[in-house]
Image (cartoon, rainbow, N blue to C red):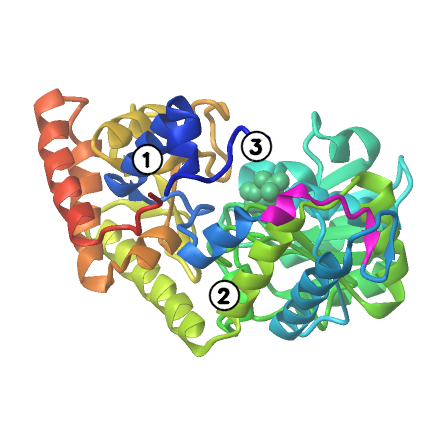
Amino acid sequence: MSRHPTSPDHANPVQSADPTVWGIIQREQQRQQNTLELIASENHVSPAVLRAAGTVFTNKYAEGYPGKRYYGGCQHVDEIESLAIERAKRLFGCEHANVQPHSGSQANQAVFLAALTPGDPILSLNLNHGGHLSHGMKVNISGKWFNVSQYGVARKDERIDMDEVRRLAREVKPKLIITGASAYPRIWDWAGFAEIAREVGALLLADIAHIAGLVAAGLHPSPVPHAEFVTTTTHKTLRGPRAGLTMCKADWAKKIDSAVFPGLQGGPLVHIIAAKAVAFGEALRPEFKTYQQQILDNARALAEALMARKYRLVSGGTDNHLMLLDLTSGHPNLTGAQAEKWLEQAGIIVNKNMIPFDERKPMETSGLRIGTPAVTTRGLKTEHMPVIAELIHLVLSSNGDADAIDRVRSRALELCAQFPLPSES
Ligand SMILES: Cc1ncc(COP(=O)(O)O)c(C=O)c1O
């Protein structure tokens, strides 16, 4: 019998078939195990989500939708996709869910394709004030194809300035108003945006990529009753596989479905849809709310501990899972890029980030974005947050001194060892 070259005759087929790839995977696993992950958009999925993503569904072509496929052999694909849709609808209380977008950007593009034509005016949050590149950045398709105007936060409190949003909306008469962010630590006023959208005849999109877990758990207000479209990634606070999800009101369902396929994508990633189904199932359980509450408690505790060390946080704190540390307060000569590097050497992973009204360039920045979803998954609690704040402080005030950074590295490693991640072998 001719066997498949990667036939699973070993407990770990990647290890036996391709030790080079397995070695790289092992090194990444060690990296994740031995560092404190504070990137606000990352998380550690459950072994069940990981396993579902690595299944035979990766073999299957399934262009189309449940019951209407362009390929034979789709009975189990239909089952898994229908289950994922049903769970997404239950989780967010939406009228329609499309679980096929490969990413958050494509989830947004589906809305653009369904609702806009090139040249249409859109209104979204300024990238330097926390917005996402798929919401109208010049070099992104959204910025190239649409006529983008952007609102921002007010200088006085660094919160979204609703008067400015209304003024701009009246002036530019957008066809679509985009809400949601990659780096905004406060609560969104969906009802306020919906009122403005209604007044100027715009459609409303809420991109909840970052806060989807909080929304699903009822710990951040839901935009679903207010917006025609709600998009998200599934891999941030929601703790699912790397992918997207587009939700909409029932009267947009057909247009959204044909925008995703055949408008934007070919065959769906059915193995990832299976992993989304598992993640949505996890998010529907009561423990998920406890997890999301802990993310919030940890973020608040970390913010307070940093502020107690005299760091300024954009808008003075956080209401969600992330905060933006303004380096210009304590370390005016230190860029976000340099701080990110030193912290990485110390085993603390964050990302440089623009702060509102930043005078530095995006590759340098004056800020750091810090989030708690991943360390919370690992089991860290509020009592560990002052320790993390101390470690961050020691690195930021080290001037890059290798010994000082090494000492923090040892302490970060000790903390990681106390909270092991499940191994993939
Ligand atoms: C608000 C928001 N929307 C969309 C995306 C895009 O997601 P993806 O990287 O999956 O395309 C992100 C990713 O960071 C995001 O923060």
Real-space Cα separation, disc 2 to disc 3, in angstroms? 44 Å
Question: What is the number of callouts on the image?
Answer: 3
Residues at circles 1 and 3 in contact by the CB criterion of under 8 Å: no
Q: Out of 78 and 414, give the one closest to the viewer.
A: 78
* The one of 173 and 131 positioned closer to us in this rendering: 131
* Amino acid at circle 3: His
How many residues crowd mark 3 within 10 Å: few (<14), some (14–19), many (20+)? few
| Residue 396, x across and y down, in percent | 22, 33
* In front: label 1 or label 2: 2
Does 334 appear above or below 256? Answer: above
Query: Considering only vertical position in the picture, is 171 above or below 230?
Result: above
What residue is disc 1 on? Answer: 327
Please name the amino acid that badge 1 sits on.
Answer: Leu
Q: Position of residue 24 (x, y in %)?
A: 37, 27
Whether residue 193 is visible here, answered yes or no, is yes
Task: Name the residue at 83% across, 65% down.
Answer: 198
Give whichever of discs 1 and 3 has the lower sequence position. Answer: 3
Check mark 2 vs ligand 1: CB closer than 8 Å? yes or no: no
**Residue 17, placed above or below residue 381:** above
Question: Which stretch appears magenta?
Answer: 56-65
Task: Tell me where residue 57 appears, x and y as whole percent.
Answer: 64, 49
The residue under the point 28% across, 30% down is 344
Residue 4: numbered disc: 3
Disc 2 residue type (three-letter)? Leu
- Callout 1: few (<14), some (14-19), or many (20+) C-alpha neighbours within 10 Å? many
